[in-house]
Image (tube, rainbow, N blue to C red):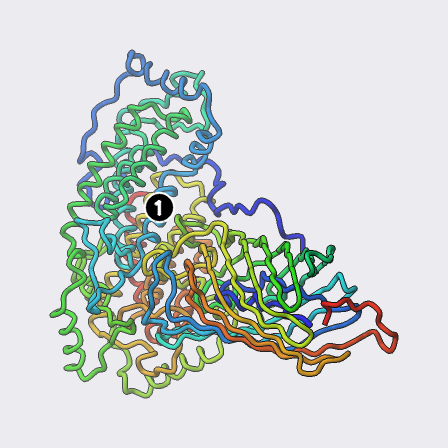
Amino acid sequence: MLFIGCNKDIAGRTDNTPSLNPANTDVNAGTWKPILLTGPAEFSIAAPIATNTPEYIAQINEIKSSQADLTSEERAIVKYWSAGAILRWNEILRDLVAKHNLPPYQNEDGTYPFPNANNPLAYPLFPFSNPPYAARAYGYVSAAQYDALVAAWHYKKLYNRPAPYKVDATINLLVPQSDLPSYPSEDGVVAGTAVEMLKLLFPGDQDFVQQKAAEHKRARILSGANVRSDIEAGEALGKLVAQKFVTRARGDRAGAAAGNQAVWTKLETDCIARGETPWYSFELPKRPPMLPLFGKAKAFLFDSLTAISLRPGPPPPVNSQQMKDETEEIYQLIKNPTRERTRIVHFWADGVATYTPPGHWDAIAAEDFISKNFSEVRWARNMALLNMSLMDASIVCWDTKYFYFNPRPTQLNPAIKTLTGIPNFPAYISGHSTFSGAAAAILGHIIPERAAQYNAMADEASLSRLYGGIHFKSDCNVGLDVGKKVGRYAVERAKTDGAE
Amino acid sequence: MTKILLALLIMLSPVISSAQTDMDAIMMGKKRFCVGPMYSYSSWKEYWEGALKRDNQNIGTVSTQMAGLMGNYGITSKLNVLFSLPYVKTKATAGTMQGMKGMQDLSLFVKWMPVETEMLGGFFSLYGIGGLSFPVTNYVADFLPLSIGLQSRTASARLMADYQTGSFFVTASATYVLRDNIQIDRTAYYTTELHLTNAVKMPDGANFNFRTGIRNERLIAEAVVNNWNTLGGFDIKRNDMPFPSNKMNATTIGVNFKYVVLPGTNEVSLVAGANTTIAGRNIGKSNTFYGSVFYVLDFNRKAKSSDQPAKTN
């Protein structure tokens, strides 16, 4: 009973992550295949000033004077950011997704308001970062950071400016030493890319984002790892690369994914015309289906015809014996849930106010990547492969959901009371299963010794939706299968991007 | 006779429960054991999302039924020990979410009356009450508002004063409740920022209770005001779900009755009461009804008990 400690503070799993100290700096990553850039030199950055110029020496002195009397808060900032720029910005993005993953409250008349990107701070706040929105956000930020770092590595090798602590040995280096040239700074690149991408994706949170970016840049100077011009060049490069991704995002059709009343009605009538039972919303008042046109968004790993070809065949007809059996299976499962099944449901639920299933897979990946000591550019490449898989999985999954518009188990048997919330979109195929299949496929390629565990996690995530009473077995099995097919496109890319 | 843990029902059970000790100024006599079953029904349709009062068509009315066993043993007439253990079942009338059920938290208290003195023509007494509570099963805390409890182990300290003149009495108490961190089934959660852990830091709580009415050999009839505040925690965001470490505040008013049906050494009494929530934050605007039957077992055997102060049942 000795439980009343005075200090109840809780450390997060990555709070005390050691400084990133890559086993291999991937010095030739400037030759890796970018995603959108035509080549690593598409955006040019000026040659750095020489290390014997008065301006450079002034920047060295900036480091020295900032290090003269480090506070504990400054040391904490250095330690936090030294764990890795890709890691920390991925965590910040997951924070923003969780913060914004809240469905808008209804209007007085029972309709629902939609968030407005041009007025993000008015209720309902923009965005509502539901799973497709989140998958796309993770995808774009990760892909842009990867391209920007490929470009950065190109210029690092080209200009070959040594790190400040190699120019002046009296600098007190607070992070691990590296043989990588320091211009442009990879941390500046990652921060600059993130800031620019997040203006588009989370336009109401710029104060938070800018504060993080300022802290990140300051940490690099305090640590002695970069002079200011390293960081500024990196930041500028990151912004330029990000702008190319922002332009792509503005034209990728996701902005029109919410549809309108005519679209929503047509989904229903088309389904009835096929002789099937259309999905309906279980929310009260009935909420329009979530992002019905998201399946038309532009994928990263394949073209739109391929996306359609990945759409699986139809679910069992609602009146078939198979569907009756699958409905009964769910009813039996939810009648007497065990504590272990409930744990699995909640472990993987990733519902309202969470970082969504793609964020959960990012968390799983990030914690494994920490132990692999990847360079920043390899971190970015692996995160981009994962998040492009997750984004493209969401596109194929949403296309399938709205192509078939199939009901949830509770619609076929109202006695099915669920252990988690019923998501407001059709059942077939399961989003969790599709995301998890895709993530397990690419992560199993990146860290082969963990492939079996990733598959087991994907199976459990998929089953959690069955246990929760919100998906049929067909939704889950086909979802996993489709996800794995999507993930294989990322694996094929990984084999040929020059990093292996 | 005792009314252990009526305070337990004052809250939006089950969200805040179990941390409450007996809030009455009644001691069991030496070697007397009062025990009995209790039942309560609590429900709410409206709740406070932060400071905003609203309803939710997707849950309708949320009800909590609680059935438990409570007991109070007199080590001496000035030192009692008490326990309670409820089984809890929740339900929502609308939407698709399944309610939960299970054994909740075992609460144990030590109640000490160091001062009992005549004053201004009546009796004044002071009490110190220490309590512990802990979950007896691994129930789910992180499924509010349908969780049966919060899983937090607690320790509480209460100071209570009572004054009685004739049949009229007033009792006031203040309690500080330490609440231990809890573990939830998921590995990350958002409060006002993202937490990458399954551990949740629970804010402590403070409770104030005031009760007054009549109290004699056969009958207690009292009005009760109770105020519970968590010292910290965060507000539910617009249209978000509640979370165990929310700031949860509640003020309730209610009435409570006890009637001794069969007086004597092996006394039998009935307790009934009700209360309603008049103000709150991140909590249901609940109405609660409860009742219990208590039976006194006298372990003084045939030895004559001379240790029976006036206020002991």
State left or right for residue A46 relative to residue B207: left
What residue would you read off at disc 1?
A90
State left or right for residue B105 relative to residue B247: right
Quick one: which residue is furthest to the right in this view? B303
* Letter of the chain that mark 1 sits on in the rendering: A
- Residue A149: x, y in percent? 29, 37
Name the residue rendered at 44%, 29% in the picture: A74
- Snapshot quadrant of residue A164: top left
Q: How many marks?
A: 1
- Residue B214: x, y in percent? 61, 70
What secondary structure is marked by label 1? helix
Rendered view: A335 above or below A311: below
Amino acid type shown at disc 1: Asn
Q: In front: A327, or A482?
A: A327
Question: Quadrant location of the C terminus of chain A?
Answer: top left
Name the residue rendered at 52%, 69% in the picture: A340
- Snapshot quadrant of residue A459: bottom left
Q: In front: B204, or A470?
A: B204
State left or right for residue B259 relative to residue A85: right
Name the residue rendered at 37%, 52% in the picture: A362
- Residue A217: x, y in percent? 34, 31
Question: Quadrant location of the N terminus of chain A?
Answer: bottom right
